[in-house]
């Protein structure tokens, strides 16, 4: 038991350290980039609490909407409550924000905890995989919307080719994700799981085929897929609303269309830092670069990026703690069940 509990503990401590480091670097960036302009620094620090509050208030519905997107993929008879799905999504987000390769780790952990809530393991794994696919596909179309809005009413020489290239990449990316999920490399994955099963007998190599079958069944439920995409799309748009309101509080108001451009392009570029905790520094650079396309000065864009980073850290630290407690709780539930099987 002690060995099993030590693993979540190590992840928790690493996440806490990463969160503290991000907060310190963000504060240092504000001070360093504004040290020659004390009035500007004072304005940023004075507006920071209200901007943070707005960012947090908008992000809470986003968590529920992405939780609903995952929930709609689960068969009605097995669906947990909305609050439970929002918590699982919160755990995934916390891992993504503070742990290396946290997107993968958080997805696996959340699927496991979903299975502990009475959802079949094959359904939990399949819905987690398809949910990521639907989120990615919705982001691709959201990015295309941002590119289209950028082209409207602007001198876009050279940008039309970029937009068409983006459309082609979006279609290829979406097609690749769907094709991969429909035809997983089962033989290769089973061989790896078979080797792992020699050390951990609880691993079932054949489970990968069960998950594949469940994914194919989900692909036939077109209404559920469209509903999941719709919830994710609303969440992306709320991110643009967050950007617009935060920039307005920072003294650089933008239209909702320009905010969609910033959010769409910044989120697309953020994917380049997928292996970094929270795409640290990549996200900030993406927001600054995307904002420059609609005329937002770098200082204001950086301030908005740091507000978002502060909100992510503030949400993710307690999220890691809640995830850690949920893992420990699931281990305590597993232990009596395992002991009962052994005694039988």
Image: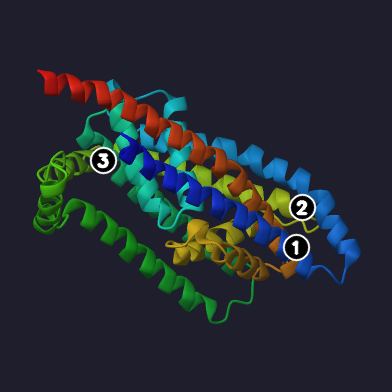
Quadrant in the picture for residue 122: top left
Name the residue rendered at 50%, 75% in the picture.
160
Name the residue rendered at 50%, 62% in the picture.
270
Q: Nearer the viewer, residue 240 or 93?
A: 93
Name the residue rendered at 26%, 40% in the picture.
125
Q: Residue furthest right?
A: 39
Quadrant in the picture for residue 331: top left
Q: Number of marks in the image?
A: 3
**Disc 3 target residue:** 125
In the image, residue 42 lies at what x, y percent? 87, 57
In the image, residue 244 lies at what x, y percent? 69, 52
Decide which of tag 1 and tag 3 comes sooner along the chain.
1
**Disc 1 target residue:** 30
Q: Are marks 2 and 1 in contact (CB under 8 Å)?
A: no
Q: Vertically, is 175 above or below 310?
A: below
Which-is-in-front pick, marks 2 and 3? 3
- Mark 1: give few (<14), some (14-19) or many (20+) Cα within 10 Å: some
Quadrant in the picture for residue 8: top left
Which secondary structure, mark 1?
A: helix
Which secondary structure, mark 3?
A: helix
Q: Vertically, is 100 above or below 124?
A: below
Which-is-in-front pick, marks 1 and 3? 1
Q: Residue furthest bottom?
A: 158
**Disc 2 target residue:** 248
Name the residue rendered at 45%, 40% in the picture.
91
Decide which of tag 2 and tag 3 comes sooner along the chain.
3
Task: Using the image, tell me which numbered label, if any, was put on residue 334.
Answer: none
Q: Nearer the viewer, residue 58 or 230?
A: 58
- Mark 2: give few (<14), some (14-19) or many (20+) Cα within 10 Å: some
Gap in Å between the C-alphas at discs 2 and 3?
A: 41 Å
Q: Residue furthest front?
A: 2
Residue 341 appears in the picture as rendered: yes
């Amino acid at each position: 038991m002690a060995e099993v509990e030590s693993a979540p503990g190590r992840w928790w401590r690493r996440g806490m350290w990463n969160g503290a480091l991000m907060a310190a670097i963000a504060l240092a960036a504000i001070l360093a980039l504004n040290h020659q302009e004390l009035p500007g620094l004072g304005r940023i620090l004075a507006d920071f609490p209200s901007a943070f509050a707005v960012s947090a208030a908008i992000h809470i519905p986003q968590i529920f909407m992405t939780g609903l997107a995952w929930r709609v993929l689960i068969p009605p008879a097995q669906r947990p409550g909305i609050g439970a799905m929002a918590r699982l999504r919160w755990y995934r987000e916390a891992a993504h924000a503070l742990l290396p390769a946290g997107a993968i780790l958080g997805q696996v952990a959340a699927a496991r905890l979903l299975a502990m809530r009475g959802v079949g393991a094959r359904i939990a794994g399949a819905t987690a995989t398809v949910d990521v696919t639907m989120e990615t596909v919705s982001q691709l179309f959201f990015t295309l919307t941002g590119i289209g809005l950028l082209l409207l009413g602007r001198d876009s020489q050279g940008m039309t080719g970029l937009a068409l290239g983006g459309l082609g990449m979006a279609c290829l990316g979406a097609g690749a994700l769907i094709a991969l999920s429909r035809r997983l490399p089962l033989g290769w994955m089973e061989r790896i799981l078979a080797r792992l099963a020699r050390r951990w007998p609880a691993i079932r190599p054949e489970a990968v085929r069960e998950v594949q079958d469940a994914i194919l069944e989900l692909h036939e439920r077109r209404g559920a897929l469209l509903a999941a995409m719709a919830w994710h799309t609303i969440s992306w748009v709320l991110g643009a609303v967050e950007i617009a309101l935060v920039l307005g509080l920072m003294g650089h108001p933008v239209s909702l269309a320009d905010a969609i451009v910033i959010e769409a392009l910044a989120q697309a570029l953020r994917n380049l830092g997928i292996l970094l905790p929270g795409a640290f520094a990549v996200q900030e650079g993406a927001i600054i670069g995307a904002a420059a396309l609609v005329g937002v000065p770098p200082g204001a864009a950086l301030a908005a990026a740091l507000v978002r980073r502060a909100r992510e850290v503030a949400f993710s630290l307690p999220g890691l703690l809640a995830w850690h407690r949920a893992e420990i709780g699931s281990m305590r539930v597993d232990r009596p069940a395992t002991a009962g099987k052994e005694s039988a």
